[in-house]
Amino acid sequence: MKKVVIIGGVAGGASCAARLRRLDEEANIILLERGKYISYANCGLPYHVGDVIKSRDALILQTPEAMQKKFKVDVRVQNEVVSIDRDKKVIIVKRLETGEIYEEAYDTLVIATGSSPVRPPIPGIESSRIQTLWTVPDTDRIHALIQKQNIKKTAVIGGGFIGLEMAENLRHAGIEVSLIEAMDQVMAPLDYEMAQILHENILQNGVKLFLGDGVASFREENDRVTVTLKSGKAVETDLIILAIGVRPNSELAKAAGLSLNVRGGIVVDDTLKTSDPSIYAVGDVIEVEDFVSKERTMVPLAGPANKQGRIAANNIAGAQERYEGTQGTSVAKVFDLTAASTGSNEKTLQKRGLTKGKDYESIIITQNSHAGYYPGAVPMTLKLLFSMDGRKIFGAQIVGRDGVDKRIDTLAVALRMGAGIDDLKKLELAYAPPYSSAKDPVNMAGFVAENVLNGLVVFSDWDVEHKHPDAVLLDVREDAELMAFTIPNAVHIPLGQLRSRLTELDRSKEIITFCAIGVRSYNAARILMQNGFTNVKLYPAGTRFYQSVH
Amino acid sequence: MKKVVIIGGVAGGASCAARLRRLDEEANIILLERGKYISYANCGLPYHVGDVIKSRDALILQTPEAMQKKFKVDVRVQNEVVSIDRDKKVIIVKRLETGEIYEEAYDTLVIATGSSPVRPPIPGIESSRIQTLWTVPDTDRIHALIQKQNIKKTAVIGGGFIGLEMAENLRHAGIEVSLIEAMDQVMAPLDYEMAQILHENILQNGVKLFLGDGVASFREENDRVTVTLKSGKAVETDLIILAIGVRPNSELAKAAGLSLNVRGGIVVDDTLKTSDPSIYAVGDVIEVEDFVSKERTMVPLAGPANKQGRIAANNIAGAQERYEGTQGTSVAKVFDLTAASTGSNEKTLQKRGLTKGKDYESIIITQNSHAGYYPGAVPMTLKLLFSMDGRKIFGAQIVGRDGVDKRIDTLAVALRMGAGIDDLKKLELAYAPPYSSAKDPVNMAGFVAENVLNGLVVFSDWDVEHKHPDAVLLDVREDAELMAFTIPNAVHIPLGQLRSRLTELDRSKEIITFCAIGVRSYNAARILMQNGFTNVKLYPAGTRFYQSVH
Ligand SMILES: Cc1cc2nc3c(=O)[nH]c(=O)nc-3n(C[C@H](O)[C@H](O)[C@H](O)COP(=O)(O)OP(=O)(O)OC[C@H]3O[C@@H](n4cnc5c(N)ncnc54)[C@H](O)[C@@H]3O)c2cc1C
Ligand SMILES: Cc1cc2nc3c(=O)[nH]c(=O)nc-3n(C[C@H](O)[C@H](O)[C@H](O)COP(=O)(O)OP(=O)(O)OC[C@H]3O[C@@H](n4cnc5c(N)ncnc54)[C@H](O)[C@@H]3O)c2cc1C
Ligand SMILES: CC(C)(COP(=O)(O)OP(=O)(O)OC[C@H]1O[C@@H](n2cnc3c(N)ncnc32)[C@H](O)[C@@H]1OP(=O)(O)O)[C@@H](O)C(=O)NCCC(=O)NCCS
Ligand SMILES: CC(C)(COP(=O)(O)OP(=O)(O)OC[C@H]1O[C@@H](n2cnc3c(N)ncnc32)[C@H](O)[C@@H]1OP(=O)(O)O)[C@@H](O)C(=O)NCCC(=O)NCCS
């Protein structure tokens, strides 16, 4: 009888155990978890803090008892693995309640130890009012602090998805929130201009936003913690949530001499085997291949962890299934908005040395979530990055209110399946007025990208003032629309009048066309380009986007 | 200067005109439309009847004047093309307001005449209280009838998507509805068992449903129309909406000697040229290739019509773009549900002579729209059809409340890009609790399909009583769940107790396992199969589905 020991009992570990049992009723499967809980919904924790998910029980998908009964897995919570003896094929385990140490032999070992939130050595970091949210007990602690300690002001350090979810949920619980982020933007997977749409909405939701300003120190005094930022600004709080990143829980693997990468990620082959053929590793703790760049990277997400757990189980049961890399598809609810991305962003392409216009192109468009004439249609802004020959999609980002998750999934599948721009045009997506438009936003992205590659249209930079200081800004919206918002210093000629008023425009100048979302201004650009104007550009995603980024 | 005449000014025609203008500012583009309106939202019309779309203006995307000004297109509404003289390259046009006839020459002609609702020669069909809904004037007429004539009872003939949308909107307007359908199910793109979920909800919404019962005759008397069905049943109504199918508006093409198929669809090559190289045809009026079967077919949908219009424009402007077939992705809101499909259904596969278990396999699963612990998660039922080697997806159908449109699009892209089962497993879809689960329903479909192909699990027929009359039905849900619903004659052993109670089951019998959605019962099936039970099957999609189909 094969003996399989799994270290870590949540996403990767529990999935691996469940699948393995279905494949092999006889295997002796032991699941070791240092925490009190297995198989819980990490991803739901922020929502329990905000009471959006009211039931704490709902977050725990399997109790140790249930897992034991349903899957015949020997589940041992509060059992921490302290070392691995690869030669003897045993692990050393500590029973945390008693302190007792014991050995457990394995035929195959699975390391699914996940990652932990980073707590950098900033002065004052040891305060008990500086919390991280990672586990059920963390959530209980934060929940209790909020309910019992009259928490009114919090600071969330870190504008990644966990920080943003926490900010939203704390606001939901009626608490003041300052969001502090060292970079000049939240949500690193987005490019700067796309993140600006989030910044606008975060501010509208009453969060104080500190961007481009790292933490210099914390100071606790009288139940309050003051955060001093590098800029010298001070933020007073009752509670701080630290969410500035994760590091892999790979101490065990390191001590056992398994190959790690520089960031501490366990190196695995494409069957998820570590450098020791008896040891698999899955989830946040491993290094994976970036599906787009084929470089080695680390992507701590639940989807990949679950899938890897299943693949490891298959391989332990005798398959030779390969894990073919992670493209980093992700989505987050950020107050009233949804932000999603897949593949590489432009920052990453540039870091890899790729140049816009030479190695890649990009578009930003606005489109409605569904047919504009059906109630509830709301705009989304979509950025697409692709190769100059149109054959490869590098990545996509979408920010909007509704239908964002659908379009990122459409694009994620396209990217995964090796689609090019031409394929996006042809995708036959489901259309009825409540759900989409006859040309779905993803089709539109294909059309627009093709137009860029064919030179039918050229986009301006979103930062027109700095990048195109001498350009004529031509607003082609109708008169009535100008009442809501006007672009400073723009010339105004409604699209329907453009052909008859061409003489009002200076052909020697760069002209940048604007409308609300970019469709009429595109038609305007085509009219100008076909009437002898040689330097015409289209402002991406229209005045809506202009407003978000200005 | 090239002269392009387009016949038909809505989806295919208007799109073609707009794109062509953007490619060629100089072309002389004439758009001829026999109706009063161009460029309107056919698909929105049912929702205007139900006052869900309140503004009639919102349905008209471009007026002739706006189209003229913005696109420099010579738009002529109420101008009906009455014949095509291919030798002389002229068309004969009738000005409907004056009756005047004139000739118009063309270099290139585009036929985008769409389709019309079928009005079969049933006795009594000529009543003015039997309406079809196809155009803006149709909508105005029905709207006016409802508002002014005190309509209380209606019958909708035809359970396709237009009939269903009309039924929903009439109910929305507070009117009694009888839905009459000659087939034994509504929504032909779905297989029978999937349509049953719709039937359940249609009935719950107070619609009287007559299935498998065609219309024998109509009789108008005193402002009422009585429908007599083939079964002899009579339905009294104040108004009837006929929505039993469409036929292509190809009379012009036929008279001009262009190649048509047996159903009257215009035959085009893959660049959308008809048998006359100066004439293109697009939209509902043409025959297309079925993307899955590669057979010739007709798919009257707006997405294909719009895309074809754009491709024809590109080709008229000198490109050689190919239209690569229609997969028939569609979606409809049906009361509280969404029903969607892509590719072939099982009926079609069988009509093509394919046999289940030999040429194709199918699965039906239930999964939640998003993580069960986040508020608002609702189940969807997904059917997937695929080849025995797992390399080809034939089609998919989904019925549910939320997230259905997203999953059908994911699957539509996968199908389009040639994905196999293995690819579905690997798709990296966006996960956060409000949007999906770590294993998205589409991934799950991949896992389950693989399990079927590998023999890890065998599904029973949904119709257990008839197809498996001697089987033991084994319900593995928890005690508490049985209070809500019990399966007649089922044996009950909760999953967690199964291993210890195996002796209670007869190994010589066929055993069919049940739980709420199919996951625990799958685990139960694995336990049985690995413990020497040789004839174990899983009831598809759980007791929820059982209830819908029973
Ligand atoms: C608040 C929060 C929100 C998130 N939201 C999302 C989201 O919306 N979408 C998404 O895709 N991802 C999200 N994630 C990330 C996702 O939860 C992780 O990627 C996933 O859980 C990783 O799975 P894993 O099995 O590698 O690690 P984990 O699920 O973290 O499990 C590792 C387990 O190993 C145990 N362990 C570690 N060392 C030992 C040891 N020596 N002995 C015994 N046990 C040990 C740990 O106690 C832990 O329980 C979120 C994470 C958090 C914390
Ligand atoms: C009520 C309703 C709801 C729908 N809902 C959906 C949906 O939700 N999703 C979906 O994908 N599809 C839907 N459709 C189908 C979709 O609208 C059609 O597939 C699409 O409009 C076809 O485009 P077309 O250009 O071929 O034809 P049309 O859009 O019908 O345009 C053809 C035009 O040609 C004109 N014409 C015909 N003959 C002549 C002539 N001899 N001279 C001059 N003009 C002529 C007609 O008057 C008509 O205006 C719906 C259709 C209807 C009626
Ligand atoms: C709870 C847990 C142990 C369950 O593991 P699991 O049994 O593999 O997963 P699920 O319950 O999702 O079920 C999936 C299985 O059911 C099958 N299945 C799903 N729906 C089915 C249906 N309707 N009919 C038949 N089979 C179905 C799948 O094929 C899969 O089986 P397979 O892997 O053998 O192919 C594991 O998912 C877990 O611990 N999750 C919580 C931790 C976590 O993921 N955290 C991060 C995200 S918040
Ligand atoms: C109104 C109508 C004439 C517009 O045609 P259109 O201009 O081709 O279509 P849209 O307004 O959707 O715009 C699409 C164009 O804008 C471009 N575009 C879309 N969003 C853009 C953005 N944000 N920035 C730049 N360009 C953009 C697309 O690339 C496309 O141009 P292309 O075809 O030259 O590549 C036509 O769609 C129509 O008549 N529709 C109503 C009828 C109908 O479809 N009925 C059935 C469904 S209810």
Image (cartoon, coloured by chain):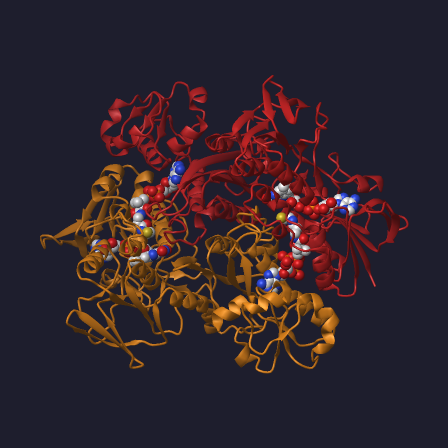
Chain colours: A orange, B red
From the top left corner, tell me how far across and down residue B272 is, in percent: 73, 49
Which quadrant of the figure has residue B74?
Answer: bottom right
Is residue B123 shown above or below B440? above
Q: Is residue A389 something that shows in the picture? A: no
In the picture, measured across the screen, residue A326 lies left or right of residue B500, that is right
How many marks the image carries: the answer is 0
Q: Is residue B64 something that shows in the picture? A: yes
Q: Residue at x 70, y 63 (%)?
A: B70
Is residue B285 shown above or below A479? above
Which quadrant of the figure has residue A267?
Answer: bottom left
**Quadrant where the N terminus of chain A is found in the figure:** top left
From the top left corner, tell me how far across and down residue B454 is, in percent: 43, 37
Q: Residue reaching furthest top?
A: B232
Which quadrant of the figure has residue B262?
Answer: top right
Q: Residue at x 52, y 38 (%)?
A: B172
From the top left corner, tell me how far across and down residue B422 is, in percent: 47, 46
